[in-house]
Image: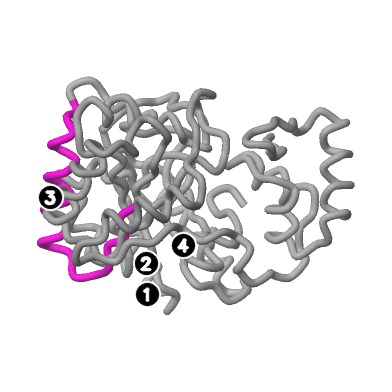
Amino acid sequence: MSYLFGPVPSRRLGRSLGVDLIPRKTCPFDCIYCEVGPTTRKTSHRLDYQTEAIMAELAAYLRQGPPLDYITLTGSGEPTLNLGLGKILRQIKALSDTPVAVLTSGALLHLPEVRAELQVADLVLPSLDAAQEKSFRAINRPLPGYPLSRLIEGLEAFRREYPGQIWLEILLLKGLNDTAAELEALHRTLRRLAPDKVQLNTAVRPGVEAHIYPLNQQEMAARAQYLKDGVEVEVIASFNDLPKPAPVCDDAVLLEMLARRPMTAEDLARVCGLSLAAVQERLRHLEEAGQISCNRYQDQGFYRQ
């Protein structure tokens, strides 16, 4: 598959089929925690990218694929950069009853046309990692001239116009956006944005920069408790609670998944429905062949292509 990946067990969306709408690492931001890697094409200009090919591949998959909890527009860059976003959403809804989610940085929500196109989605999951300019620039590293106010105003406008569910993700990093001042600024901003749900995450996978550090479970629970004020706040669950799909993974599937994000052997075993020993054996052969590498992060081994 060129544009689809999965289904994968998503911490937020259950069994999710990913749809990659944009060339690898094309984004207005260059977030220090991004598991896909550094942004290589930093832009806010929308582009015409493979709309018909994406839909042909998705239509073929839906005719014979397994049951899904969500079809998720996401991938290796910012999906709302694709000028065909609205058309893709409408065609998916015509083809399938599966709910459609859009995973976005929120960077283009200040554009009325992007907000209009997203009206068809069942669920939109934008991000807001900081509510102060200095920490926003340090964590998300936006395009020059892109202020935090533009992101927040776009989120506010989208909340006014969009009738569906908005689940706002905040990724907390130790010493960067988890201090009392940072959390208070986020708390005030959340009251303005009124998302249906706030989901707290941390750097559980290796990102672009090596100097980022995650919060532990107790710290995350304390921050969730603090941010609660008329909105549901949760710490995103682990993969462990998700159902196992059928064992259909071969080496090509493993390589495809590892090309999109780093994963542990345990992650891959759960995704593929295979035993950990079987996955470890495949990984050993792929590593010996020079097709993948393994790096340690937070006392875990993460494989990537």
Q: Give the Cα distance between marks 4 and 1.
A: 24 Å
Q: How many marks?
A: 4
Label 4: state its secondary structure: loop
Disc 3 crowd, CA 10 A, few/some/many (<14, 14-19, 20+)? few
Amino acid type at image mark 1: Ala
What range of the chain is rendered magenta?
146-169
Q: Nearer the viewer, mark 4 or mark 3?
A: 4
Taking the spot 41% from the left edge, 36% from the top edge, the residue there is 173
Q: CB atoms at circles 2 and 1 under 8 Å apart?
A: yes
Label for residue 112? 3
**Display coloring:** one colour
The tag earlier along the polypeptide, 4 or 3, is: 4
Label 1: state its secondary structure: helix
Q: Give the Cα distance between marks 3 and 2.
A: 21 Å
Is 127 within the magenta?
no
Q: Which residue is mark 2?
A: 91
Label for residue 94? 1
Q: CB atoms at circles 4 and 3 under 8 Å apart?
A: no
Q: Nearer the viewer, mark 3 or mark 2?
A: 3
Q: Which residue is mark 4?
A: 12
Task: From the top left corner, tell me how far across and down residue 12 is, in percent.
Answer: 46, 62
Task: From the top left corner, tell me how far across and down residue 121 is, in percent.
Answer: 31, 65
Q: Is residue 52 left or right of residue 48?
A: right
Task: From the top left corner, tell me how far across and down residue 79 is, in percent.
Answer: 37, 46
Q: Is residue 85 above or below residue 262?
A: below
| In the foreground, 208 or 163 | 208
Q: Is residue 21 left or right of residue 82?
A: right
| In the foreground, 256 or 104 | 104
